Each structure stands twice: as structure tokens, then as C-alpha cells.
Image: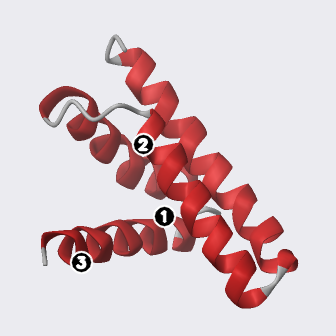
């Protein structure tokens, strides 16, 4: 149950970020607090973001084919890059 609940939060956050990819201020307004919370309060290793994104990409490829994976890979790379930058700012 906890995994399902967290999965819903993850996909909701990703959906929210995707909807704001064309607006850097709004995008950063979502990703920055998320990154800071995971870096400072939850102390989650930033490698976990890449692992989760890779799993999502694999599932997308299996379900929808390579084109969807390639498109969404650009999104996950953008998200992971920003999260990694936030982690660096927080001393990781």
C-alpha cells in the first residue's frame, strides 16, 4: 500500500513537471522543493531518481514501443539533471 501511494505521488509530480516543461519558472517551482526535501530531510540518494526513471522508461518501451521511450527519455533527463543540480547545491 505504501509503495502504491508513493508511486502515485511520483507520477503526479512527473505529470506536473511535464505540464510545465515550457515554463522554466513553474518547472523549477516544482522540482526545486522536491529536490531539496529529498536531499535535506529525507536524505534519499539522488541515484534513486535515475533508477526510477530508467524503470519507467523500460516499462514505456515494453508497453508502447521505442518511440515513446525516446520522447520521454528527454523529459526524464531534464528532471534528473535539475534534481542532481539541487543535490549539489545542498552539498551532496
Task: Determine whether, in the image, residue 53 is placed left or right of residue 43.
Answer: right
Q: Residue at x 66, y 78 (%)?
A: 60
The quarter of the rendered structure image containing the N terminus is: bottom left
Comparing labels 3 and 1, the label whose residue is closer to the camera? 3
The quarter of the rendered structure image containing the C terminus is: top left
Residue 83 position, x and y percent, is 46, 38
SS state under label 2: helix
Q: Provide the residue designation for mark 2.
A: 48
SS state under label 1: helix
Gap between marks 3 and 2 measured at Cα: 17 Å
How many neighbours does mark 3 have within 10 angstroms: few (below 14), some (14-19), or many (20 or more)? few
Q: Nearer the viewer, residue 32 or 39?
A: 39
Q: Is residue 90 above or below residue 53?
A: above
Comparing labels 2 and 1, the label whose residue is closer to the camera? 2
SS state under label 3: helix
Q: Nearer the viewer, residue 66 or 41?
A: 66
Gap between marks 2 and 1 measured at Cα: 18 Å
Q: Provide the residue designation for mark 1.
A: 17
Residue 4 position, x and y percent, is 24, 77
Q: Provide the residue designation for mark 3.
A: 4
Q: Is residue 12 above or below residue 10?
A: below
Residue 3 position, x and y percent, is 22, 69
Residue 11 position, x and y percent, is 40, 73
Amino acid at each position: 500500500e505504501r509503495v502504491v501511494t508513493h508511486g502515485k505521488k511520483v507520477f503526479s509530480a512527473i505529470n506536473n513537471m511535464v505540464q510545465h516543461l515550457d515554463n522554466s519558472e513553474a518547472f523549477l517551482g516544482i522540482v526545486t522543493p522536491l529536490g531539496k526535501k529529498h536531499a535535506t530531510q529525507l536524505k534519499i540518494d539522488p541515484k534513486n531518481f535515475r533508477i526510477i526513471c530508467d524503470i519507467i522508461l523500460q516499462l514505456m518501451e515494453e508497453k508502447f514501443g521505442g518511440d515513446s521511450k525516446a520522447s520521454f527519455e528527454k523529459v526524464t533527463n531534464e528532471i534528473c539533471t535539475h534534481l542532481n543540480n539541487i543535490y549539489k547545491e545542498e552539498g551532496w
